Amino acid sequence: MEKAKGGKTLIESILRLIDLASLYIRQQLKNIVEQGISVPIKSAGRTAAFFILAFSLFSLASIFIAIGFFLLLASFVGHIIAYLVVGALLAIAGAIVLAIIKHR
């Protein structure tokens, strides 16, 4: 076989070209996956984690505020009447939500 420039045969040069092309394609696909898929998924994951954390903190805060209002109400009217008031408010809120769901 005849040697091409650089002391390589034509077949070796073609194989080297195929290797370089496959390495280039792999590198480009890796960049596309990282920039087009991985980065947005990481960003969405972080955003979801912060929303979950914020929701959890707001839920915990609302529980403590509700307990505080219940204790304040109980100090004014007594525990039994406070339970009745809170139960009535929850029943009314449930009826409103049920009416909204049925209306749709």
Image (tube, helix red, strand yellow):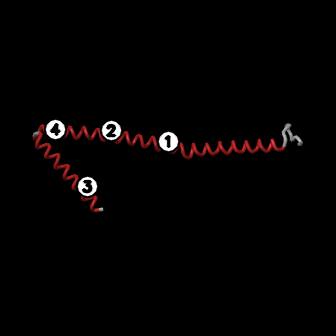
Residue 81 horizontal/vertical position (percent): 11, 43
Tell me which numbered mark, 2 or 1, is placed earlier along the sequence.
Answer: 1
Please identify the quarter of the rendering in which residue 79 is found. Answer: top left
The residue that label 2 is drawn on is 57
Q: Is residue 85 above or below residue 72?
A: below
The residue that label 3 is drawn on is 97
Image quadrant containing the C terminus: bottom left
Q: Nearer the viewer, residue 22 or 48?
A: 22
Tell me which numbered mark, 2 or 4, is placed earlier along the sequence.
Answer: 2
Please identify the quarter of the rendering in which residue 6 is found. Answer: top right
What is the number of the mark on residue 70?
Answer: none
Residue at left 19%, top 40%? 69
State the CA–CA distance, disc 4 to disc 3. Answer: 27 Å
In the image, is 20 to the left or to the right of 35?
Answer: right
Mark 2 and mark 4 residues within 8 Å of each other at the beta carbon: no
Tell me which numbered mark, 4 or 3, is placed earlier along the sequence.
Answer: 4
Amino acid type, callout 3? Val
State the CA–CA distance, disc 4 to disc 1. Answer: 45 Å
Mark 1 and mark 3 residues within 8 Å of each other at the beta carbon: no
State the CA–CA distance, disc 2 to disc 4. Answer: 22 Å
The residue that label 1 is drawn on is 42
Amino acid type, callout 1? Lys
- Residue found at the far right of this picture: 2
In the image, is 77 to the left or to the right of 49?
Answer: left
Q: Secondary structure at mark 3?
A: helix
The residue that label 4 is drawn on is 72
Tell me which numbered mark, 3 or 2, is placed earlier along the sequence.
Answer: 2
In the image, is 2 to the left or to the right of 88?
Answer: right
Q: Secondary structure at mark 4?
A: helix
